[in-house]
Amino acid sequence: MKKIYFIFAFSLFCYTGLKAQTPSDKDTTKVCQQVKKYTYCEIGGRWDTRHLSVEVWADYGQKEAGKENPVKFNSMIHALNIMASNGWELVTAYIVPVGQSDKAYYYILKKEVK
C-alpha cells in the first residue's frame, strides 16, 4: 500500500514539475521583445613615428578591412571618443605586439540596431 501511495505522490510531483516549466505565449513574447540586436566593429591602430600620430583603421566585417586607408588621429583615445560620439559602445580592448618594440591597439565596439 505504501508503494502505491509513493508511486502516486511521485507521479503527481513529476507532473506538476513538468507543467510548471512550460512558459506561456505571453512570457516568450516578452523575452523575445527584450533581446537587443547589435552590430559590431573593430578599430585598430598603430603609432606612426613619421607623422607623430596614430593610424587607425576600422573593420565592420567587410571583405577588405580598412587597413589600406587608415585615418590619422592624435591618439587611440581620440579615435575611441569619435566612435563613442557616433553611438558606439566599448566592449573590450586588447594589444597585439608587432615586431620587436611596436604594438597594435584594438578595440571591439558595438552599436544597438533599432
Image (cartoon, rainbow, N blue to C red):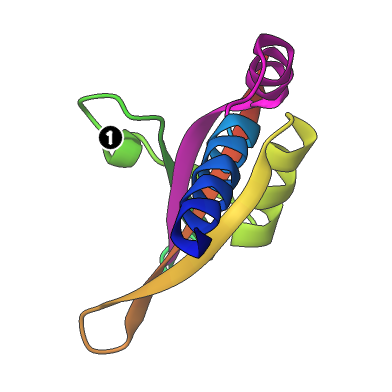
Q: Which residue is mark 1?
A: 65
Quadrant of residue 36 within the rendered picture: top right
The residue most toward the bottom is: 100
Query: Could one spot residue 46 in this view of the protein?
Result: yes
Residue 60 relative to residue 13: left or right: left
Q: Quadrant of residue 110?
A: top right
For image coordinates 59% across by 59% down, the residue present is 76
Tell me the element at label 1.
Answer: loop
| Res 79 visible | no
The residue lying toward the viewer, choosing from 72 and 41, is 41
Question: Residue 69 lies in what quarter of the image?
Answer: top left
Residue at 72% of width from left, 20% of height from top?
27
Residue beneath the point at 58% across and 27% down? 22
63 magenta-colored: no
Q: Would you place residue 22 above or below residue 91 in this image? A: above
Q: Which residues are magenta?
A: 22-47
In the depicted structure, whether residue 102 falls above or below residue 65: below
